[in-house]
């Protein structure tokens, strides 16, 4: 199994409590997911993550084909970290860490995703040509939405 990694870092001009409030509400996934993904939570969920929370949703990641994706929140450190792991979905393996820490001018939000694909020996090529660029575009979209919602953090001089 070939493991791939994606990391995205963004500094928000708000306190950690406000950043945590937004990101730890799983309903906000629909706000930060590109519309062409057809993201839809299919079961009732609470407005806060907690260990053991199962989130079931449908997405249309490629060619409009619907895929059921089930993730479990496997770890939560209030105000600092939560982790979601795929239980059912399009990846062979998906482990997504969401980190929050104080930073000059606000809060650093760091996403670290480790994932593997189900395409055997073709996985590297599929990742390079299709999956990695698609994931990067999703995180780029998310960055834009977050900047519109919270603004830009002041740049260090």
Image: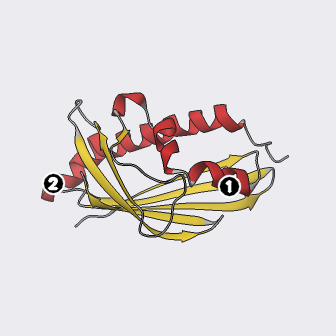
- Whether residue 140 is visible to the viewer of this picture, yes or no, is no
Pick out the residue farthest to the right. 157
CB under 8 Å between discs 1 and 2: no
Q: In which image quadrant can residue 76 be found?
A: bottom right
Closer to the camera, 36 or 30? 30
Mark 2 — residue?
119
Tag on residue 78? none
- Whether residue 23 is visible to the viewer of this picture, yes or no, is yes
Residue 140, given in percent of the width and then of the height, sits at 50, 37
Separation of disc 1 and disc 2 at Cα? 34 Å
Q: Secondary structure at mark 1?
A: strand
Q: Secondary structure at mark 2?
A: loop
Mark 1 — residue?
108
Mark positioned earlier in the residue sequence (1 or 2): 1
Closer to the camera, 30 or 143? 30
Closer to the camera, 135 or 55? 55
Answer with left or right where residue 36 lies relative to residue 11. Answer: left
- Around disc 1, counting alpha carbons within 10 Å, would you say few (fewer than 14), some (14 to 19), or many (20 or more)? many
């Amino acid at each position: 199994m070939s493991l791939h990694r994606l990391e995205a870092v963004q500094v928000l001009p708000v306190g950690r409590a406000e950043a945590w409030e937004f990101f730890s509400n799983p309903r906000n996934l629909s706000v930060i997911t590109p519309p062409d993904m057809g993201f839809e939570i299919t079961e009732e969920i609470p407005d806060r993550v907690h260990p053991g929370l199962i989130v079931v949703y449908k997405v249309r990641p490629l060619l409009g084909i619907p895929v059921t994706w089930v993730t479990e929140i496997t770890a939560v450190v209030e105000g600092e970290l939560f982790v979601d792991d795929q239980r059912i979905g399009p990846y062979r393996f998906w482990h997504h860490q969401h980190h929050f820490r104080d930073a000059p001018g606000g809060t650093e939000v760091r996403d670290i995703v480790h994932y593997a694909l189900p395409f055997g020996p073709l996985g590297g090529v599929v990742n390079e040509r299709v999956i990695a660029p698609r994931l990067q575009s999703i995180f780029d979209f998310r960055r834009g939405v977050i900047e519109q919602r919270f603004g830009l953090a002041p740049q260090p001089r």
